[in-house]
Image (cartoon, rainbow, N blue to C red):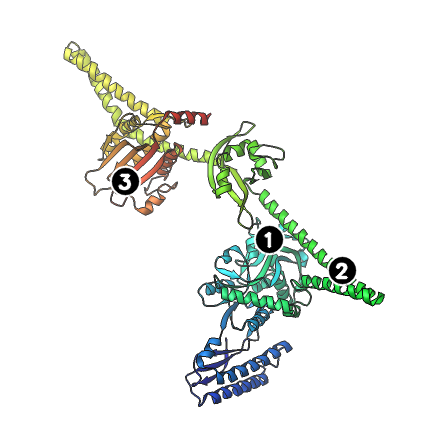
Amino acid sequence: MEEISSFPQASAGLRFVFYHERNVLLLTEPFKKTCPGRAGCLLYGFFQLVRELSASEKSDMFITHRTGRERGMAMKHIRTAAVFMISGLFLSPSAAAEEENVWRAAYEPELPPFHYSENGGPQGFAVDLLEEIAEEENFHVIYEPMADYEAAAALENEEIDLIIGMSYNQDRAESMEFSNAYYSTSIGLFVREEEAGEIDGVTRLAGNTAAVKAGSLEQSYLENIRGVQFNETSTLEQAVKLASAERADALAGEITSVGHLLDNLGVEEDFQLVDSYMVPVEYSFAAAAENYEVLRALNNGMRTLQNNGRYQEIFQEWFPEESGPGENLVLVMQILGGTLLLALIVLAAGLRINRRLQKEVEKKTYSLHEANLSLKEQIEATKNSNEFQKQILQSSPRGMMTLDKEGKITSWSPKASFMLNTEGNKTGKYYYENPLLQYYLKDKLEDVLQHGRQFLGEERDWTRDDGIQLRLRAYIYPLYDFEQKIVGVMFTFEDISEEVRVRYQAFENEKNQALSRVVAGIAHEIRNPLTSIKTFAELIPLKFESPRFREKISTLVPQEIERLNELIEGLMDYSKSRPAKKEMLDTSDLLESCFILFERTAENKGVSLTTAIEKNLVILADRQQLKQAVINLIINAIDALAEAEDIEDKWIVLKNYVCGDEVRLVVEDNGPGMSRKVQKQAFEPFYTTKPDGTGLGLAIAKQHVEENNGSFHVESGAGDGTRIQLRFPSFHPENWKESNEEGR
């Protein structure tokens, strides 16, 4: 803000500053110059101010090109300056400083007719309104032109006291306090006249480009429409210029400001408003959060202006073609009061006055009729908006259902009927009458309605009435009204059968890779017993008569054959592809079979593989899935130790033990370990630190463990080795019975 005149005064400790933009006279900090005598200095300041204003009038700076209202404002500030000067004769410096109350207000300089910069200062309806409020509440305003996001940051950092022209939304309400609204409007959609036939509403925007202000309400609203492209600008004025330059197919923005900006560019006749009620908007003043002093002054000043009629006068000056918000209500009240008063006069004065009154009533009735028609148009626009939202919901790829607090179905999307292969209207029925909702909500509905709990991404198998089996992923969360009270439940689901098929295929590929490594590792194990058997067979003709030879062959050959059988059975059991099936599983047998498969492989790579196994620690799980999980962990441990050349005594140990009501399986090694960063990504599919790795080993292991009601725990650090625990509930007969019933 430009400082026009300043006048020093040493004895009074005051400094008068006259600002050009809004003719604001301020008392600020002491000036360093001196002038003799307090009274003399004050009088000198007053006459100097008058001289400056006169000179500026001749140079067209202030008064010559201003409107009558602005010239009156300038003269009013001259009178204010005189009061300040004379008051300075009787007030002490501290008293003058205490009476000073200056607030800094941010405004967007390109949003006519509400606030904009012209002739070096702010203009507009909201600016005039704030000036009147400031006069009523005894404070002064310094104006700072800023963009919306800059003003919000400045308000939070206490660099300004309020923002002019801020529309309410939930996110801003957390960091700002909003005054009563001073203007109600809406977001509209404008298109060029020649394109009005093709784009006659928001629903026809798909495949077209819209010019919008970045981060605005209109952009947030249009992002819900599939296929709409945006040409974003930093201000609404720039968006209007883009549309007028035919660089966008449509223009979205607040209808009053867009109309003024189009008129300023001389292209208002080239555009047509095709949708006038996309999103309602209410402009208010915004103060910092919990700054109730500013908020109270703004609301009190607003009420005063509305009660004394000054608000309506300012409104008519800026919007002569409209009726001010609340004016109709005041007018109706005036009509009713006048009607009652005139009725008494009619009874006393006679028929002539009665006829005049009837004419007045007819005029006012016509005004009310026009207001009623306008209200009907707004209701129709609201219905169209609701229908548009309904179409958006119906186009969602998920099946959607909503329930009220009593458990009755209030909506059922066509996509849900298609996915479930059902027909007929399901609304109005209770959720437990539908098998799918009963299946998902029987134990969850109360938690959602009473405590606002959410159940997200729960996967289950579901068989349709026609016998087709689906894998569904469901989301259950509460529905809130505008007061944030829970009024129902939203249930959505999606068919992930194809996703599960692809995931299973990836798991099988990983298992085949692991199987190749297992086969290569046990080749030596199979060759050793075969060599022993062959040797004994070759010696039979030579030493058959020897009792000692016959004793050894009858003892050692069956042992070698049994070892071969164990290796082959373990390999076959691992390579089989069959549906998951939970059974009673002795974890000692599981770890022992894995040990047999990898003992020779580990030894060939210089790693000692040992076990610390307790018998009869039984869990309920799928044998094949858990075996694959443990094998993947052993392979990772062997690979990590094989690459660690600085570790001399390399070892891996397989353990199982009981802790509380859990059975825990442990694969532990003294390898290089994993950093925190690697641990966070290790279980993501396709993440690997090996040059030839697939990145699926640990992801598959974790998946199999969790599918069997287990949990996966990693203890590791760079250079500290790795300890992985697989924790499962201990087996109980009732668990076995419940699992069988659920499977059926």
Front: mark 2 or 1 = 2
Q: As displayed, is residue 14 above or below residue 175?
A: below
| Nearer-the-camera pick, 545 or 448 | 448
Front: mark 1 or 3 = 3
Question: Which mark is first along the chain, 3 or 1?
Answer: 1
Front: mark 3 or 2 = 2
Is 676 on the left-hand or right-hand side of 219? left
Where is residue 371 drawn, in percent x and y?
A: 71, 58
Where is residue 424 drawn, in percent x and y?
A: 63, 33
Residue 532 picture quarter: top left
For the point 53% across and 29% down, which residue is it? 468
- Label 2, label 1: how many angstroms apart (C-alpha)? 45 Å
Where is residue 601 drawn, in percent x and y?
A: 26, 31
Label 2: state its secondary structure: helix
According to the picture, the residue beneath numbered tag 1 turns out to be 208
- Label 3, label 2: how many angstroms apart (C-alpha)? 86 Å
Where is residue 494 drawn, in percent x and y?
A: 51, 38
Label 3: state its secondary structure: strand
Q: Which amino acid does label 1 sit on?
A: Asn
According to the picture, the residue beneath numbered tag 2 turns out to be 365
Is 302 on the left-hand or right-hand side of 88? right
Question: Which mark is first along the chain, 1 or 2?
Answer: 1
